[in-house]
Image (cartoon, grey):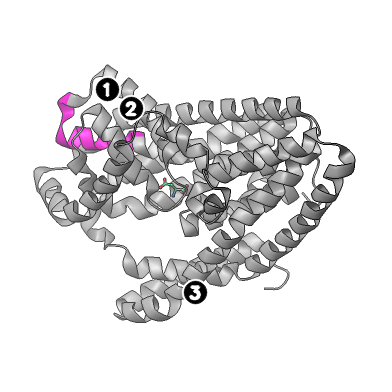
Amino acid sequence: MKNLAMHWKILIGMVLGLLFGLLMKNLEQNGFVVDWIKPFGTIFINLLKMIAVPLIVVSLIVGLADLKDISKLSKLGSRTVLFYLCSTVVAVTIGLVLANLIKPGRYINDESRKSLIENFSVDASQKIELAVKAKNSGPLQPLIDIVPDNFFKALSDNGSMLQVIFFVILIGIGLILIEEKKSKPVVDFFKGLNDVIMKIIDIIMLFSPYGVFALMASLMVEIPDFSTLGALGIYGLTVLLGLFIMAFIFYPTLLMIFAKVNPIKFFKAIAPAQLLAFSTSSSAATLPVTMECVTDNLGVDEEVSSFVLPLGATVNMDGTSLYQAVAAIFIAQAMLPEALDLQTQLMIVVTATLASIGSAAVPSAGMVMLVIVLGQAGIPEAGLALIFAIDRPLDMCRTVVNVTSDSTIATIVAKSVGKLKTPQGF
Ligand code: ASP
């Protein structure tokens, strides 16, 4: 096991975890897994989240200070935002086209619709309540939310990453603008701290095969039985097909055209991050590993990765937006087909793009924001109960696409500003 590449170790941990969970489920030992195995998965996710905010702060300060010029920052920022926005619109469009062609809603008969709504309406209404809170604020609330009234409060909350990024960018700009004699000691301090944090991530990653084992085993005993969910199969496959097109056709094409990077090498480089995204369903928890893979294995300069990736983890969610488009159309087809005119579909492009930007990078956040997409399009929100049962596996897959998208765009932006080195060993 010692010389095996990290992604193989994680993959073995995942497969063994799945098998172990399945075995325990069959032996009716769910309680054992929940009490004695699941906590190690939770500890692993906590370790990753624990290091995420310090990593963003320190690496972003070091990255920005290295830019030495504010015009470079605005170039980097505008390219990043442009690519993030375009890739999200492409994702929603692919989702809409597939859902209209395949029409997954047709496969839901009256009986399965009734039983799904009956079984999952309580769970769904909890998500709807959460979404109502988000919706009740004014249109400019997301802008207000970026500016913290207290930086230390923002630091203490993993959900306030944009606020942290905002303040740290100001520190970076301050460091660029003051005399080098004064900024150098500060930057040197953060450079040292950055190395320490990178080492801590290496240490946490030693635990990753065991962490994903625990996560997969507990997932197996906790998700509903798939055999009763046949009617949702076509819907699930439509989402998966869309995610597949994004991951294996769209991003590789972008990489080849804009960054001249071989997609196979790219996938090999970011495999540990993708596997962790799959096991944790959270791009925020995966962020430290994504940063390490993109910087060390792909050769993206830290100046770029430290800015593009944390921003991407919070606002760029192609997998989530694609899923929201398919899910909205699926629910409409199953419950209110007449709601689906062209205008509504165009509205879904806009709202799903915005909703994915507003989704937190944590498990099932995309589903909460889907409520807003449904509400705006006049599709019954109670339809959320239809898709609840298979949300978790789809969440795992869309998180992989979210992380792949961030890594792709970091590589392309780095290439465009001459900051893509040829990495060693790849
Ligand atoms: N779990 C996703 C992420 O963290 C968000 C979502 O689609 O629910 O990227």
Q: Which residues are magenta?
A: 325-338
Q: Disc number at residue 344?
A: 1
The foreground one among 284 and 138 is 138
Query: Judging from the image, what secondary structure is the residue with disc 1 in?
Result: helix
Label drawn at residue 235:
none
Q: Mark 1: which amino acid?
A: Thr
Q: CA distance from mark 3 to mark 1?
A: 45 Å
Q: Residues within 10 Å of mark 3 (few under 14, many from 20)?
A: some
The 10 Å Cα crowd at callout 2, few under 14, some 14 to 19, many 20 or more, is many
Residue type for callout 3: Phe
- Residue at 52% x, 25% y is 86
Residue 278 as seen in the image, left or right of residue 138: right
Q: Is residue 75 above or below residue 299?
A: above
In the image, 68: left or right of 375? right
As drawn, the residue found furthest toward the top would be 343
Instruction: Identify whether 25 is placed above or below 396.
Output: below
Distance from Cα at disc 2 to Cα at disc 3:
39 Å
- Judging from the image, what secondary structure is the residue with disc 3 in? helix
Horizontally, is 83 left or right of 388 in the view?
right
Kindly check if marks 1 and 2 are in contact, taking CB atoms under 8 A apart as contact: yes
Q: Residue furthest front?
A: 149
Type of residue at label 2?
Ile
Element type at mark 2: helix
Circle number at residue 40: 3
Locate residue 47: give its quadrant: bottom right
Quadrant where the N terminus sits is bottom right
